[in-house]
C-alpha cells in the first residue's frame, strides 16, 4: 500500500510539472526546477522529502531568427582606448550635429528680442549661453542622465522599459515570470531592502492612475521628439541658407524659402538609401565644422575684444535681467536654442558607449562651442548692428564660401540625425504597443539601428515644407523649436528622478537635488518659451498633441483587445471533450495560429474549428511578444511548450523580442527554424520523461531502504545528493549537449519512449504537406452600454488606425495562398 501511494504521488507531481494547459501551470516556469516527492508514513508519522534537480527544458530555438552583426551595440566593457576614441569621433556626426549648428541662429534670435545698447547686453547674453551649456548638456546629461541607460540604450522609452522591469506598470498585461529570467532583464540593485524604493514600487503597481500618468509622460516626451524631427530640418537648413542674404545681390526671403525647400526635398528623398551609404562622411564633415567654429571664434576673440571673458562671472546674468527686465525674460526663448539636440546625447546612446559620448563632448564639442559663442560676442562688442546675421558677418574675409558649404552640410547632417532618431522612437513605440504597425525597412545589414519608415519620412517632409513656407523666418521657427526641446528635457528629468528613487535607491537628499536644480532651470526656460505660443510656439504643442492622441488611443485599444481575448479564450475542458480529433478531421500539414495570448487557447481557434471541414495534423500557437528590454539574446528568444496530450499534436511558441531587435521577415526561414526547434523540443521532452522514469525506480528502491532503516531504529540523515547538479552559472545556462551528457546511460536510451520516432515522422509528414497561416481578422467594437467617448475612440478612431496600419500577414511576407482568415469581433 505504501509503495502504491508513492507511485501515485510521483504520477501526480509528474502531471503537475508537465505543461498541459496554460491555465493549469505557468508555461514559463524556471528552466531548472525542483522535483519534489513527499512520502507520508501514517504508521510512523515521519515525513521525508527528496529534492532532485531536473534538466533544463528546451525553451529556445537553437538558431536565431535574426542575423544582424553587432546587434548588441558597442557596450562591451573591454573596449580599447583606440576603439573608444574612434567611437567618440563618430559621435560628432550622429549625436552632436544639432547642437553644433546652434551658433548659426542663437545670438540672432536673442538679440531680436533685446537690442544691444551696451556691453552688459552682450556679456549677459554670452554668460547665459555659457552657463546653460555647462549646466544642462555638460552637468546633467554627460554625468548623470547617461548613466540611467537601459543596457546601453537611451531615450524616454528606454527609461520607461527600465522602470517597467522593476515595477509592473506596463498597461499591456502579457508579462510572464520567464521574462525575468532573460539575462538582460535582471536589475542589479545596491540595496534592495530599502523601504522607500519598495513603497514607491507598491504605489506604482497598485494605482492604475499612476500607471496611466507614467505612460502619458513617456508618450508626451516621445511626441515632442517627433516634433523635433519636423522642426530641426526646417530650422537648421533655413538658418544655413539664410547666410546668402546680404552676400548674394537680390537673394531675398522668397529665394531663401525656395532654396530651403529644395534642400529639404533632397534630404528626405535620400533617406531610403539609409544613413550607412553617406555615414562615412558624417563624422569628418562635423569634425571640420567644429574645427572651423572653434578657429573662427578664437580668431575673433583675439582680434576684436578678449575682454568678453568677463562673461565667466555669472553676475552679468543678473545685470542683464536688471537692465532689460521683461525683454530679457523673452530672450531666454532664444538662449535655450543653444542646447537643442542635447537629448540626442541620450537618445542615440544605443550606437555608442557612455565613455565615447563623454569624451567627445568634453574634449571637442564643449570647448568649440564656447569659443564660437565668445568669438561672436567679441565681434558684437565692436559691431553691435550685425546681430541679425552675426555668424556669417563674423566669418573672416575670403572664408565665406568654404564656411557656407560646411555650415549647409553640417545643417543637413544635423537634420539627418534627428530624422533617424524619430524613426527609432517610432519603432520603439511600435514594439511596446504604443503606435500602429508600419512598414520598416532596415537599410543596413551590420547595424540594427539604421532603419527607414517610408510613411513617417514623407509625413516629416510635407510638414517641414509647410513650416518653412508658412513661417518664412528662422526667428518664428525658433519660437516653436524651444518648446519641444525643453518639454523633452523635463520629461527626462522626471523619469531619471524616478529611476534614482526606485532603482538606484540614491540618497533622498541627492535624488531631490537633481529635479530641484535641473528641473528649476528647465521650468524657467519653459515659462519663457511658453510666452511665444502665439508667435509659433503652438506648432510643437499641436504636433505633440496629435501624436500623443494616436499613441495613447492605440495603446488603449490594444489593451482592451488583449483583455477581451483573455476573457474569451477557450477552456481546456472543451478541448478534452472534443478529443484528439478536435471534433473534426485532422489532415497532414502544419497550421500556425498567430495570436497575442501568452496563456490559454485563443477564441479564434474555435472559429477555425467551426468554419473549416478539417484541421491540420500539427497545430502551433505562435505569439510574438515584445518585452521591455532592448535586445533579447538569441539563446533566450523562444519558449516552446506542448498543449494537451501527445495525441493532440498541439504546441505553443512564444517569440520574445526586445524593442531594438530586428525581426527577419522571411517566412521560409522562420518555418525551417520552427520545425527544427520543434524536433529538438520533442527529443528533449522524451529525455525528460526517461529521466523521470529513472527517478521513479530510484525512489521505489530508496523507499525500501528507508523502511528498513526505520525498522532498525536509525534516524534518516540529510537530504540525498541530487541526481543532477545545477550547472547554470550567473552568465548563462549550460548547453543542452552538456546537460544530456550528464544523464545516465539508461536514461539516454531511445527505447524508453517509443512514441518519439512516431511523433517525429508525423511532424516530417506534416512539414512536407506545407504550412498554413491561420489568422484572425479582428474587429474591435465598444459594448453598447459604453460611454459615448469610448464608442467614439474605439469604433471610429482606433478602428481607422487598425484598418490602415500594416497587417500581420504583411509583416510576415507570407503568400496569400498560404493564409486563411476568419473574422472575429471583440466587444470591449
Image: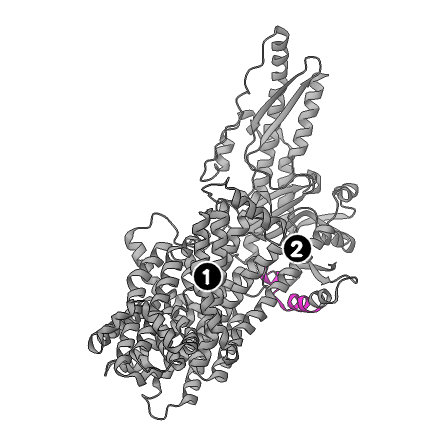
Q: Earlier in the sequence, mark 1 or mark 2?
A: 1
Say if the magenta span includes residue 804: yes
Question: What residue do we see at 50% from left, 44% from top?
Answer: 186
> How dense is the environment of label 1, judged by Cα within 10 Å: few (below 14), some, or many (20 and up)?
some
- Closest to the camera, between mark 1 and mark 2, is 1
Note whether 255 is above or below 278 in the view shown. below
**Residue in the foreground of this view, choosing between 355 and 117:** 117
Quadrant where the N terminus is found in the figure: top right
Q: Which residue is mark 1?
A: 519
- The magenta stretch is 796-814
Question: What residue do we see at 42% from left, 78% from top?
Answer: 327
Q: Which mark is residue 771?
A: none
Question: Where's residue 788, x and y in %?
Answer: 74, 67
Q: Which residue is mark 2?
A: 772
Question: Where's residue 313, x and y in %?
Answer: 29, 67
Asked whether residue 478 is in view, the answer is yes
Question: What residue do we see at 46% from left, 43% from top?
Answer: 188
- Compared across the picture, whether 278 is left or right of 673 comes to left
Amino acid at each position: 500500500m505504501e509503495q502504491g501511494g508513492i507511485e501515485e504521488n510521483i504520477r501526480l507531481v509528474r502531471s503537475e510539472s508537465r505543461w498541459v494547459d496554460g491555465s493549469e501551470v505557468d508555461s514559463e516556469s524556471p528552466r531548472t526546477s525542483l522535483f519534489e516527492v513527499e512520502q507520508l508514513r501514517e504508521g510512523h508519522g515521519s515525513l521525508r522529502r527528496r529534492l532532485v534537480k531536473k534538466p533544463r527544458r528546451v525553451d529556445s530555438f537553437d538558431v536565431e531568427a535574426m542575423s544582424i552583426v553587432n546587434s548588441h551595440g558597442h557596450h562591451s566593457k573591454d573596449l580599447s582606448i583606440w576603439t573608444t576614441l574612434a567611437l567618440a569621433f563618430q559621435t560628432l556626426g550622429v549625436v552632436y550635429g544639432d547642437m553644433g549648428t546652434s551658433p548659426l541662429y542663437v545670438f540672432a534670435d536673442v538679440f531680436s528680442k533685446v537690442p544691444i545698447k551696451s556691453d552688459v547686453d552682450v556679456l549677459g547674453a554670452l554668460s547665459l549661453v555659457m552657463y546653460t551649456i555647462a549646466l544642462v548638456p555638460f552637468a546633467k546629461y554627460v554625468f548623470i542622465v547617461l548613466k540611467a541607460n537601459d543596457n546601453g540604450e537611451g531615450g524616454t522609452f528606454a527609461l520607461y522599459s527600465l522602470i517597467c522591469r522593476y515595477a509592473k506598470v506596463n498597461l499591456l498585461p502579457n508579462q510572464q515570470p520567464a521574462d525575468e529570467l532573460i539575462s538582460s532583464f535582471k536589475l542589479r540593485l545596491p540595496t534592495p531592502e530599502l523601504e522607500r524604493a519598495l513603497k514607491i514600487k507598491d504605489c506604482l503597481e497598485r494605482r492604475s492612475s499612476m500607471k496611466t500618468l507614467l505612460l502619458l509622460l513617456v508618450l508626451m516626451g516621445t511626441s515632442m521628439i517627433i516634433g523635433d524631427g519636423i522642426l530641426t530640418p526646417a530650422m537648421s537648413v533655413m538658418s544655413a541658407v539664410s547666410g546668402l542674404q546680404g552676400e548674394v545681390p537680390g537673394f531675398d526671403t522668397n529665394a531663401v524659402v525656395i532654396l530651403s525647400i529644395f534642400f529639404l526635398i533632397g534630404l528626405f528623398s535620400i533617406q531610403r538609401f539609409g544613413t550607412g551609404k553617406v555615414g562615412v562622411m558624417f563624422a569628418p564633415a562635423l569634425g571640420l565644422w567644429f574645427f572651423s567654429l572653434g578657429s573662427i571664434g578664437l580668431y575673433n576673440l583675439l582680434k576684436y575684444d578678449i575682454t568678453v571673458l568677463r562673461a565667466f562671472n555669472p553676475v552679468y546674468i543678473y545685470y542683464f535681467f536688471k537692465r532689460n527686465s521683461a525683454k530679457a525674460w523673452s530672450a531666454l526663448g532664444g538662449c535655450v536654442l543653444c542646447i537643442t539636440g542635447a537629448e540626442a546625447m541620450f537618445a542615440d546612446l544605443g550606437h555608442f558607449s557612455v565613455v565615447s559620448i563623454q569624451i567627445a563632448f568634453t574634449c571637442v564639442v564643449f570647448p568649440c562651442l564656447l569659443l564660437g559663442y565668445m568669438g561672436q560676442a567679441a565681434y558684437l562688442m565692436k559691431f553691435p548692428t550685425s546681430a541679425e546675421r552675426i555668424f556669417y558677418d563674423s566669418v573672416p574675409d575670403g572664408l565665406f564660401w568654404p564656411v557656407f558649404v560646411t555650415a549647409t552640410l553640417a545643417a543637413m547632417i544635423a537634420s539627418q540625425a534627428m530624422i533617424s532618431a524619430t524613426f527609432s522612437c517610432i519603432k520603439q513605440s511600435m514594439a511596446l504597443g504604443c503606435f500602429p504597425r508600419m512598414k520598416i525597412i532596415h537599410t543596413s545589414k551590420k547595424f540594427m539601428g539604421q532603419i527607414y519608415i517610408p510613411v513617417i519620412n514623407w509625413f516629416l517632409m510635407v510638414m517641414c515644407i509647410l513650416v518653412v513656407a508658412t513661417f518664412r523666418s528662422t526667428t518664428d521657427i525658433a519660437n516653436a523649436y524651444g518648446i519641444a526641446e525643453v518639454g523633452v528635457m523635463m520629461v527626462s528629468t522626471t523619469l531619471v528622478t524616478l529611476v534614482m528613487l526606485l532603482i538606484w535607491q540614491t540618497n533622498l537628499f541627492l535624488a531631490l537635488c537633481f529635479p530641484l536644480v535641473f528641473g528649476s532651470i528647465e521650468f524657467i526656460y519653459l515659462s519663457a518659451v511658453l510666452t511665444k505660443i502665439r508667435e509659433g510656439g503652438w506648432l510643437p504643442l499641436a504636433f505633440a498633441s496629435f501624436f500623443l492622441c494616436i499613441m495613447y488611443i492605440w495603446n488603449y485599444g490594444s489593451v482592451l483587445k488583449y483583455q477581451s481575448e483573455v476573457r474569451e479564450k477557450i477552456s481546456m475542458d472543451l478541448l478534452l471533450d472534443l478529443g484528439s480529433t478536435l471534433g473534426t478531421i485532422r489532415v497532414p500539414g502544419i497550421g500556425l495560429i498567430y495570436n497575442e495570448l501568452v496563456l490559454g487557447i485563443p477564441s479564434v481557434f474555435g472559429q477555425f474549428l467551426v468554419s473549416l471541414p478539417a484541421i491540420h495534423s500539427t497545430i502551433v500557437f505562435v505569439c510574438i511578444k515584445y518585452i521591455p528590454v532592448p535586445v533579447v539574446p538569441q539563446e533566450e528568444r523562444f519558449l516552446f511548450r506542448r498543449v494537451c496530450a501527445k495525441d493532440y499534436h498541439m504546441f505553443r511558441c512564444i517569440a520574445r523580442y526586445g524593442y531594438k531587435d530586428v525581426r527577419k521577415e522571411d517566412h521560409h526561414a522562420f518555418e525551417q527554424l520552427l520545425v527544427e526547434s520543434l524536433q529538438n523540443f520533442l527529443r528533449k521532452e522524451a529525455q525528460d520523461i526517461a529521466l523521470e522514469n529513472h527517478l521513479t525506480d530510484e525512489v521505489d528502491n530508496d523507499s525500501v531502504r528507508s523502511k528498513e532503516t526505520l525498522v532498525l531504529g536509525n534516524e534518516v540523515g540529510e537530504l540525498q545528493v541530487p541526481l543532477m547538479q545545477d550547472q547554470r552559472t550567473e552568465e548563462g545556462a549550460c548547453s543542452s549537449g552538456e546537460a544530456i551528457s550528464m544523464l545516465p546511460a539508461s536514461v539516454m536510451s531511445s527505447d524508453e519512449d517509443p512514441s518519439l520516432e512516431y511523433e517525429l515522422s508525423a511532424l516530417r509528414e506534416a512539414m512536407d504537406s506545407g504550412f498554413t497561416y491561420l489568422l484572425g481578422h479582428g474587429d474591435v467594437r465598444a459594448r453598447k452600454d459604453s460611454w459615448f467617448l469610448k464608442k467614439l475612440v474605439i469604433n471610429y478612431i482606433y478602428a481607422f488606425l487598425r484598418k490602415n496600419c500594416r497587417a500581420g500577414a504583411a509583416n510576415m511576407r507570407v503568400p496569400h495562398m498560404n493564409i486563411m482568415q476568419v473574422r472575429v469581433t471583440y466587444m470591449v
